[in-house]
Image (cartoon, rainbow, N blue to C red):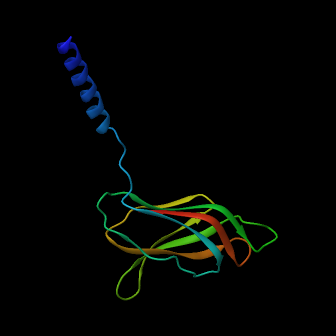
Protein backbone atom coordinates (compact mmCIF):
# COMPACT_ATOMS: atom_id res chain seq x y z
CA UNK A 1 0.00 0.00 0.00
CA UNK A 2 2.84 2.38 0.89
CA UNK A 3 4.54 1.75 -2.49
CA UNK A 4 1.30 2.52 -4.35
CA UNK A 5 0.86 5.87 -2.59
CA UNK A 6 4.48 6.80 -3.28
CA UNK A 7 4.04 5.95 -6.99
CA UNK A 8 0.85 8.04 -7.21
CA UNK A 9 2.71 10.95 -5.55
CA UNK A 10 5.58 10.70 -8.04
CA UNK A 11 3.22 10.60 -11.02
CA UNK A 12 1.22 13.56 -9.67
CA UNK A 13 4.38 15.61 -9.12
CA UNK A 14 5.66 14.76 -12.60
CA UNK A 15 2.39 15.82 -14.22
CA UNK A 16 2.36 19.08 -12.23
CA UNK A 17 5.95 19.87 -13.23
CA UNK A 18 5.11 19.11 -16.85
CA UNK A 19 2.33 21.71 -16.79
CA UNK A 20 4.71 24.35 -15.43
CA UNK A 21 6.67 24.15 -18.68
CA UNK A 22 3.61 25.01 -20.78
CA UNK A 23 2.52 28.14 -18.95
CA UNK A 24 2.51 30.98 -21.52
CA UNK A 25 4.96 33.85 -21.11
CA UNK A 26 3.44 37.12 -19.98
CA UNK A 27 4.40 40.59 -21.09
CA UNK A 28 6.93 42.42 -18.98
CA UNK A 29 4.42 45.06 -18.08
CA UNK A 30 1.03 46.54 -18.73
CA UNK A 31 -1.18 49.32 -17.51
CA UNK A 32 -4.84 50.13 -17.85
CA UNK A 33 -6.10 53.68 -18.14
CA UNK A 34 -8.59 55.79 -20.12
CA UNK A 35 -8.65 58.82 -22.42
CA UNK A 36 -10.89 61.77 -21.66
CA UNK A 37 -11.01 64.78 -23.95
CA UNK A 38 -7.87 64.20 -26.02
CA UNK A 39 -7.04 66.37 -29.03
CA UNK A 40 -4.48 65.88 -31.79
CA UNK A 41 -0.91 65.71 -30.37
CA UNK A 42 -1.98 64.86 -26.79
CA UNK A 43 0.49 62.42 -25.20
CA UNK A 44 0.04 59.40 -22.96
CA UNK A 45 2.09 59.03 -19.80
CA UNK A 46 5.49 57.35 -20.22
CA UNK A 47 6.28 53.73 -19.43
CA UNK A 48 9.62 51.94 -19.23
CA UNK A 49 10.20 48.83 -21.32
CA UNK A 50 13.31 47.02 -20.06
CA UNK A 51 13.13 44.62 -23.05
CA UNK A 52 13.59 41.56 -20.85
CA UNK A 53 10.94 39.42 -22.54
CA UNK A 54 10.71 40.33 -26.24
CA UNK A 55 6.96 41.05 -25.91
CA UNK A 56 5.28 43.24 -28.50
CA UNK A 57 4.30 46.77 -27.55
CA UNK A 58 0.57 47.30 -28.05
CA UNK A 59 -2.19 49.78 -27.26
CA UNK A 60 -5.76 48.46 -26.99
CA UNK A 61 -8.77 50.80 -27.10
CA UNK A 62 -12.33 49.87 -26.09
CA UNK A 63 -15.38 52.09 -25.65
CA UNK A 64 -14.34 54.78 -28.13
CA UNK A 65 -16.26 57.97 -28.97
CA UNK A 66 -15.69 61.48 -30.25
CA UNK A 67 -17.45 64.81 -30.08
CA UNK A 68 -18.76 64.29 -33.63
CA UNK A 69 -22.33 63.38 -34.63
CA UNK A 70 -20.68 60.75 -36.87
CA UNK A 71 -19.27 58.95 -33.80
CA UNK A 72 -15.94 57.17 -33.72
CA UNK A 73 -14.38 55.57 -36.78
CA UNK A 74 -10.61 55.69 -36.56
CA UNK A 75 -7.79 57.22 -34.51
CA UNK A 76 -4.18 57.42 -35.62
CA UNK A 77 -1.81 56.77 -32.72
CA UNK A 78 1.97 57.16 -32.94
CA UNK A 79 4.49 55.41 -30.69
CA UNK A 80 7.53 57.40 -29.59
CA UNK A 81 10.69 56.49 -27.71
CA UNK A 82 11.66 59.26 -25.28
CA UNK A 83 15.30 60.11 -26.04
CA UNK A 84 17.62 63.11 -25.67
CA UNK A 85 16.82 65.43 -28.57
CA UNK A 86 13.87 64.78 -30.88
CA UNK A 87 12.01 61.66 -29.72
CA UNK A 88 12.19 58.61 -31.99
CA UNK A 89 9.03 58.05 -34.04
CA UNK A 90 8.29 54.31 -34.12
CA UNK A 91 5.35 54.60 -36.49
CA UNK A 92 1.67 55.41 -36.61
CA UNK A 93 -1.06 52.78 -36.42
CA UNK A 94 -4.72 53.11 -37.30
CA UNK A 95 -6.84 52.16 -34.30
CA UNK A 96 -10.52 51.38 -34.93
CA UNK A 97 -11.28 50.82 -31.24
CA UNK A 98 -9.15 47.68 -31.25
CA UNK A 99 -5.47 46.78 -30.69
CA UNK A 100 -2.52 48.46 -32.39
CA UNK A 101 0.85 46.68 -32.24
CA UNK A 102 4.41 47.85 -32.92
CA UNK A 103 6.38 44.66 -32.33
CA UNK A 104 9.13 44.16 -29.76
CA UNK A 105 10.88 47.42 -28.85
CA UNK A 106 14.36 48.03 -27.44
CA UNK A 107 14.69 49.10 -23.83
CA UNK A 108 13.71 52.67 -23.05
CA UNK A 109 10.87 55.00 -22.12
CA UNK A 110 7.88 55.13 -24.47
CA UNK A 111 4.61 57.00 -24.97
CA UNK A 112 2.01 57.41 -27.69
CA UNK A 113 0.26 60.43 -29.14
CA UNK A 114 -3.05 61.00 -30.89
CA UNK A 115 -1.99 61.90 -34.43
CA UNK A 116 -5.36 61.90 -36.22
CA UNK A 117 -9.12 61.38 -35.87
CA UNK A 118 -11.46 60.56 -38.75
CA UNK A 119 -14.39 62.41 -37.18
CA UNK A 120 -14.49 65.14 -34.56
CA UNK A 121 -11.74 66.90 -32.70
CA UNK A 122 -11.98 65.27 -29.26
CA UNK A 123 -11.39 61.61 -28.38
CA UNK A 124 -12.79 59.62 -25.46
CA UNK A 125 -11.80 55.99 -24.75
CA UNK A 126 -13.33 54.18 -21.76
CA UNK A 127 -10.50 51.64 -21.49
CA UNK A 128 -6.92 51.77 -22.76
CA UNK A 129 -4.61 48.81 -22.12
CA UNK A 130 -0.90 49.32 -22.85
CA UNK A 131 1.24 46.18 -22.97
CA UNK A 132 5.02 46.12 -23.30
Q: Report whether 80 appears left or right of 73.
A: left
Quadrant including the C terminus: bottom left
Q: Position of residue 125 (x, y in %)?
A: 64, 67
Q: Is residue 21 left or right of residue 110?
A: left
Farthest residue toward the left?
A: 3
Kindly give the residue lying farthest to the front in the view shown. Answer: 2
The answer to which image quadrant residue 29 occupies is: bottom left
Spot occupied by residue 28 in the image (x, y as percentages of width and height): 36, 60
Q: Nearer the viewer, residue 10 or 17?
A: 10
Q: Residue at x 64, y 80 (%)?
A: 39
Total marks shown come to: 0
Q: Residue at x 26, y 34 (%)?
A: 17
Measuring from the top left, give residue 41's x and y in whole percent: 58, 82
Most extreme residue toward the bottom is 85
- Picture quarter with the N terminus: top left
Q: Measuring 24% from the left and 23% from the top, which residue is drawn there?
A: 9
Q: Residue at x 58, y 75 (%)?
A: 114
Task: In this rendered view, identify the residue nearer to me: 87 or 22.
Answer: 22
Vertical arrangement, residue 4 with respect to residue 104, above or below = above
Furthest toward the right, the residue is: 69
Q: Position of residue 12 (x, y in %)?
A: 28, 25
Amino acid sequence: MQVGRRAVGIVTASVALGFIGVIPAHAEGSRTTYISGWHINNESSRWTDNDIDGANTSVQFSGCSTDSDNGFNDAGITLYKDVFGPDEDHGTRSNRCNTSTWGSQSSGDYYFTLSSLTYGGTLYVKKVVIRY
